[in-house]
Amino acid sequence: MTTESPQWFKSSYSNNGGNCVEIAANLVVTSGVVPVRDSKTPNGPALSVPAGAFSSFIASLKAGEFGAA
């Protein structure tokens, strides 16, 4: 396990009134995970997603596989 702290950031596309998620991509190399959290609850829980699964999810979003919001 790493002692590195997550460095949280929001997408530049997240200007939608606060309904955002944040990720900490800095832990991919050391832990192999991408932590994800609700930006409205920064001290709340974070979900650790395996890096490969997160990459597949992003590729599916970009391909439009989930439809329009």
Image (cartoon, grey):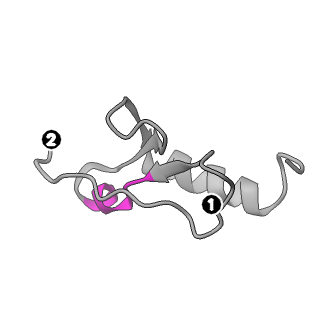
**Amino acid type at mark 1:** Ser
Residue at (48% x, 40% y) in the render: 40
Is 26 a magenta residue? Answer: yes
Instruction: Using the image, tell me which numbered label, if any, was put on residue 14.
Output: 1
**Residue 59 occupies quadrant:** bottom right
- Furthest-bottom residue in this view: 12
The correct choice, above or below, for 35 with respect to 24 in the image is: above
Q: Judge from the rendering whether residue 17 lies leftward or rightward of residue 5; answer left or right.
A: right
Q: Which of 61 and 6 is in front in this view?
A: 6
Per the image, the residue denoted by label 2 is: 1
* Residue range highlighted in magenta: 23-29
- Furthest-left residue in this view: 3
The residues bearing labels 2 and 1 have C-alpha atoms spaced at a distance of 30 Å
Q: Dot 2: what SS?
A: loop
* Residue 24, x across and y down, in percent: 37, 55
Is 67 a magenta residue? Answer: no
Residue at (43% x, 36% y) in the render: 41
**Residue 48 occupies quadrant:** top left
Considering the image in quadrants, where does the N terminus appear? Answer: top left
Nearer mark to the viewer, of 2 and 1: 1
* N-terminal label among 2 and 1: 2
* Residue 11, x across and y down, in percent: 56, 64
Q: What is the chief secondary structure element of the magenta stretch?
A: helix
**Residue 42 occupies quadrant:** top left
Residue at (62% x, 60% y) in the render: 14
Q: Which of 5 and 14 is in front in this view?
A: 14
Q: Judge from the rendering whether residue 29 lies leftward or rightward of residue 53; answer left or right.
A: left
Disc 1 packing (10 Å; few <14; some 14–19; many ≥20): few
**Amino acid type at mark 2:** Met
